[in-house]
Image (cartoon, rainbow, N blue to C red):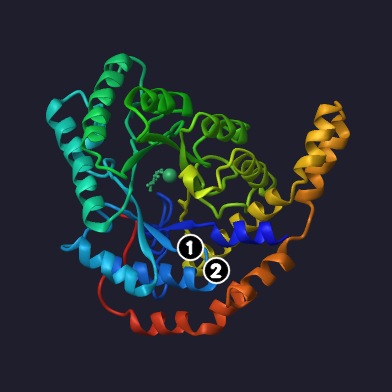
Amino acid sequence: MTDIKAVLRAQHIETPSWAYGNSGTRFKVFAQQGVPRDPYEKLADAAQVHAHTGIAPTVALHIPWDKVDDYADLARHARELGVGIGAINSNVFQDDDYMLGSVTHPDARVRRKATDHLLECVDIMDATGSGTLKLWFSDGINYPGQDDIRARQDRLTDALAEVYDRLGDGQRFLLEYKLFEPAFYATDVPDWGTAYAHCVKLGPKAQVVVDTGHHAPGTNIEFIVAFLLREGRLGGFDFNSRFYADDDLMVGAADPFQLFRIMYEVVRGGGLDPEAGVAFMLDQCHNIEPKIPGQIRSVMNVQEATAKALLVDRDALAAAQAAGDVLGANAVFMDAFNTDVRPLLAELREEMGLAPDPMAAYAESGYFEKIAAGRVGGEQAGWGA
Ligand code: RM4
Ligand code: MN
């Protein structure tokens, strides 16, 4: 138990700045009370999540949503709040120029503009001390014949190589894949195999990020996790959950068993060791639920799945597997999943000097009432759609 607690205490889950701003579907973005009006206020909200969970010490930024004049100052503000700047997320999907793609666009001028943005994100990493650049490309085509699939791979290769060469010591990029949306016929980085192949060609500073909402229904995500980790190419996660497509709901909400299976493969592959460099990030939108408690709940969901994964009796499992005991092995697995780890986590939090129930502690803190009353005027931050 002490070992498990030590691992859980050291776990870091990164929250995304965009989860604190307003978000929605293409039908409607609902405004909520107390929503941050700038990146500084987003960091203040993220610091609340860390204050009550004790395991969310970094915040991912999204550029240009979190554009500020002085990034070093923003990083200083974060430090004062007790958090740090995590991954820098690039955005080459919200400019009119990108209608036909960004780094894979047929026009060299647009490709240059997109690649320059990615290089600017590395400058921001330098200024904030962030070690991770996250690359997600909405690039793709809607109709057969619209553009040359192979040429688009060539253009992607060129852009990735240029960004890779710009990375400094202690910096890396994570290449994200997504099956579809907004491209509906052929996405240029649709799956982990494509991302992996590009990363392997580039070198060790290029790794794959698994966004749990970016697969076809029924995909065995834990297999992908096991494979990438084994190859040293699992850079991290964008956690969220989905019932249908890229729903961006709270991680663990739709399928806690899947989250457990993923976390088991992480544990099995040594992915919780800090040296493994796996970033546990959330990439979610809280469209109808309050944002800070939504993030607290999400962090707790990952922590619960991690605790259960750590509880798997690995010796018993190995013995059952070696004996070909199918039902016995499965029972060992299910025993861990069916364990109520909430008392263990409450105890852990008390040992860390925290309240045992982060949701209740936040509700009682008065923070929401304070921001609802204080953040009036100005423009609420949104996800930029
Ligand atoms: C994309 C992708 C990226 C995230 C944006 C907001 O679908 O998941 O990681 O930065 O959404
Ligand atoms: Mn993502």
Q: CA distance from mark 2 to mark 1?
A: 7 Å
Task: Look at the numbered disc 2 and give the secondary structure of its residue.
Answer: helix
Q: Nearer the viewer, residue 16 or 226?
A: 226
Residue appearing at x 72%, y 65% in the figure: 344
Q: Up-down: is 145 above or below 267?
A: above
The residue tagged 2 is: 53
Task: Look at the numbered disc 1 and give the secondary structure of its residue.
Answer: loop
Q: Nearer the viewer, residue 103 or 1?
A: 1
Residue appearing at x 41%, y 60% in the figure: 58
Q: Are marks 2 and 1 in contact (CB under 8 Å)?
A: yes
Q: Nearer the viewer, residue 10 or 72?
A: 10
- Circle 1: is it few (<14), some (14-19), or many (20+) Cα within 10 Å? many
Quarter holding residue 112: top left
Quarter holding residue 357: bottom right
Residue 38 shows up from this direction: no
Residue appearing at x 47%, y 53% in the figure: 284
